[in-house]
Image (cartoon, rainbow, N blue to C red):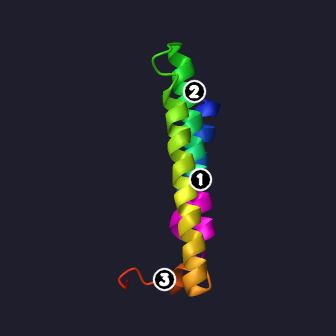
Amino acid sequence: MTPVHFSFTSAFMLGLMGLAFHRTHLLSALLCLEGMMLSLFIALALWAMQFESTMFSAAPMLLLAFSACEASAGLALLVATARTHGTDRLQNLNLLQC
């Protein structure tokens, strides 16, 4: 495994472990998701550069656009949760209630 592959694999795993084990606030969960998406973007960009083809060059930009949409939806949910519940702690949220 090359150092580049090791670095983005470890970045993805670090974001995944942060999402799995550090579930106190909604904002920290969103930041872990963004870290995972950033490592996927780097991996996809390196993969597209490796093939040196224009056919794969749009894939990282598409992933980046979806990541921006995911971030805006997550921040909108964070604001709505903070307004209704007064906090962004995940323990205070009950997903079974409407």
Q: In what element is the residue under mark 1?
A: helix
Question: In x, y percent, where is residue 98?
Answer: 37, 83
Q: Amino acid at mark 2?
A: Leu
Question: In x, y percent, where is residue 5?
Answer: 57, 34
Spatial CA span between label 2 and label 3: 39 Å
Residue holding disc 1 = 34
Q: Is residue 70 above or below residue 40?
A: below
Q: Residue furthest left?
A: 96
Q: Is residue 27 found left or right of 65 in the rendered image?
A: right
Visible residue check, residue 1 = no
Q: Residues within 10 Å of mark 1 (few under 14, many from 20)?
A: some
Q: Nearer the viewer, residue 39 or 64?
A: 64
Q: Provide the residue span drawn in magenta.
A: 17-34
Total numbered circles: 3
Q: Is residue 4 above or below residue 96?
A: above
Q: Which mark is residue 93?
A: 3
Question: In x, y percent, where is residue 37?
Answer: 55, 47
Circle 2/circle 3 CB separation < 8 Å: no
Spatial CA span between label 1 and label 2: 18 Å
Q: In what element is the residue under mark 2?
A: helix
User: Which one is closest to the eye, mark 2 or mark 3?
Assistant: 3
Q: Amino acid at mark 1?
A: Glu
Residue holding disc 2 = 46
